[in-house]
Amino acid sequence: MRSLIGISSPNFSFVPFNGVLERIRKHFDLWEIISDLEHDLSNLEGDISYAMNSYGIKFQVHAPIADLNIGSPANRSRKFSLNEILELIDTCERLSIRTLTIHPGAAIAYGDEVKERVRKATKESLKAIDRKIKGMSLKVALENMPPASWSIGYDLKELLSIIDGTSIGICFDTGHANVAGSIDDFLLENRRLTNVHLHNNDGSSDQHLPLDAGTIDIGSIVRALRKFYPGNYIIESRDLKEGIHSKKCLEKWLEL
């Protein structure tokens, strides 16, 4: 199956679904919708189903990036976050959406002092998620994070350790990896690679620049990925205009 170029942006989540859809579908066949704010999937099943059937646009889903923490060292918070993901999985399955990307847990407020507890809690949540998707067509991908006092999972070795023993895959985020200095690790053949997020930066922070801006040679990355990765490419942009510009760059690198 041919790889598709999709778009995603947290900024889209501030605008009602149909308003964003009308603009996106003119330029993209795939939208990785972030299930936050105005785009909470639990309220959009009918709209998404209509969009898929009427316009032929395809969807991937990114789990909420605000308020959820599947690795929270506070068990009650972890269970709440996990249950939200499990319900989102049911929604994706009903809509025949095939890819769901999630973030690992975060060591909010306590930083390095609780990171080992966050890793352990994240693993427990992922085991529950893995049990949930058994027998489903949905694939779940855990995304690499940028290095920070609160983050875990910003290199391939740690991600593989966290998902060990599950069927969960990896979402390779180029911008996060550039800040972490871990891009090369992800360009080795990795059968767990399930999704790819493309955006650029100058290496100092997660800036979500267009693909041809910043210090990352996205073209070289795409050429390397094409040797072993058959999946879709999601452009994470700050707005639709920049996303369209990045799509033109990516089409050239993919030789479309």
Image: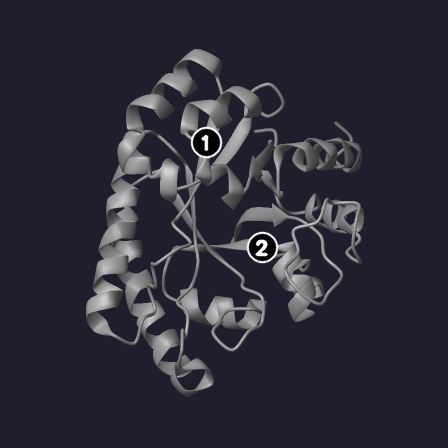
Residue kind at label 2, given as amino acid type: Phe
Among all residues in the image, which is located at the extreme left? Answer: 76
* Dot 2 alpha-carbon crowd within 10 angstroms: few under 14, some 14 to 19, many 20 or more: many
Please determine whether, in this image, residue 83 is positioned above or below residue 27. Answer: below
Looking at the picture, how far across and down is residue 13, in whole percent? 45, 39
The residue tagged 1 is 59
Going by the image, does 56 lie left or right of 244? left
Quadrant position of the N terminus in the picture: top right
Residue 196 coordinates in the image, percent (x, y): 59, 47
- At label 1, the amino acid type is Phe
SS at badge 2: strand
Kindly indicate the quadrant of the structure image that contains residue 48.
top left
Q: Residue at x 68, y 58 (%)?
A: 187
- Give 48 or 192, whichever is nearer the viewer: 48
Q: Which of the image's four quarters has the C terminus? A: top right
Q: Quadrant of residue 137?
A: top left
Question: Which sits earlier in the primary sequence, circle 2 or circle 1?
Answer: 1
Q: Is residue 62 visible?
A: yes
Q: Identify residue for label 2.
A: 172
Q: Residue at x 47, y 24 (%)?
A: 19
